[in-house]
Amino acid sequence: MVNKMSENEILVNDDKLNEAQNIVRTHTYYAMGAGLVPIPVFDFVAVTGIQIDMLRCLSNLYEIDFMENKGKNLLGALTGGGASSSFAPMLASTVKMIPFLGSILGAVSMPAIAGATTYAVGKVFIQHFEAGGTLLNFDPKAMKAYYAEQLKEGNNIAAKSTPATKSAIS
C-alpha cells in the first residue's frame, strides 16, 4: 500500500523547507558580516557562534533537541576533515595580524570563507533533518561528500555577494 501525503502535509513540508533555507541564508550573511571584523581570531569565534545558532534554529524548526556541546562537536567533525576547509577560516582570520596587507587580505577572504562554510553546514543539516535525522545520529563522515559539494555552491554564492572574492575557497 502506498502512503500518499495529503496536500496540506506537502504544503507544511514545503513551508518548513523554505523556512530552513531562510535560516541558512540569513546566517550565511551574518557569518559574512562577522568575517569583516578586523580582530584576528575574534571573527573566527563569531562565525562559529553564528553556525551554532543556525544549528539551534534548524533544530528548533525540525523539533529536534538541541545540545550545544554536541552541536559544536558535530560542526568541528564536519568542517575539520579536509585541510583546506578546516584551516582556511583560521588562516584567513590570523592573516589579519600582518600589518596593513594582512587586514586587506583578511577582509577580502574571511567573509567569503565564513559565508561558504556556514552555507554548506546549513545545507548538510537541512538534508539530515529532512531525512528524519537528529543530532544524535548525525554521521559527519557520511556527509563529507555532500558538505564538499555544498561548500563549492556556498563559495559561488559568497563570491557573488562579495565581488572582490571570486575564489577565496578552492
Image (tube, grey):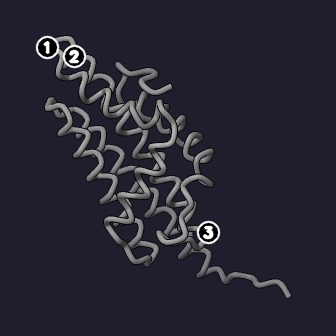
Location of residue 162 by image quarter? top left
Q: Which residue is mark 1?
A: 99
Q: Residue furthest right?
A: 1
Mark closer to the observer (2, 3): 2
Instruction: Give the structural element (helix, strand or loop) at label 2.
Output: helix
Residue at figure coordinates x 62%, y 54% from the top left: 142
Q: Is residue 147 above or below residue 14?
A: above
- At a point 37% along the width and 39% down the height, the residue shown is 115
The disc labelled 2 sits on which kind of residue?
Gly
Measured from the top left, where is residue 23 in percent x and y? 38, 58
Q: Which residue is mark 3?
A: 131
Q: Nearer the viewer, residue 34 or 87?
A: 87
Q: Viewed as shown, does residue 54 lie left or right of 46? A: right
Look at the numbered disc 3 and give the secondary structure of its residue: loop
Pick whichever of labels 2 and 3 is earlier in the sequence. 2
List the residue tagged with mark 2.
102
Amino acid type of the residue that numbered disc 1 sits on in the rendered structure: Pro
Return the residue nearer the eye: 93 or 126: 93
Give yes or no for contact between labels 1 and 2 (Cβ–Cβ under 8 Å).
yes
Q: Secondary structure at mark 1?
A: loop
- In the picture, measured across the screen, residue 132 lies left or right of residue 160, that is right
**Three-letter amino acid code at disc 3?**
Ala
C-alpha separation, residue under disc 3 versus residue under disc 1: 47 Å
Residue at x-position 34% and y-position 53%:
51
Question: Which residue is drawn at the image coordinates 39% and 30% (left, top)?
Answer: 88
Left or right of 10: which side holds 20?
left
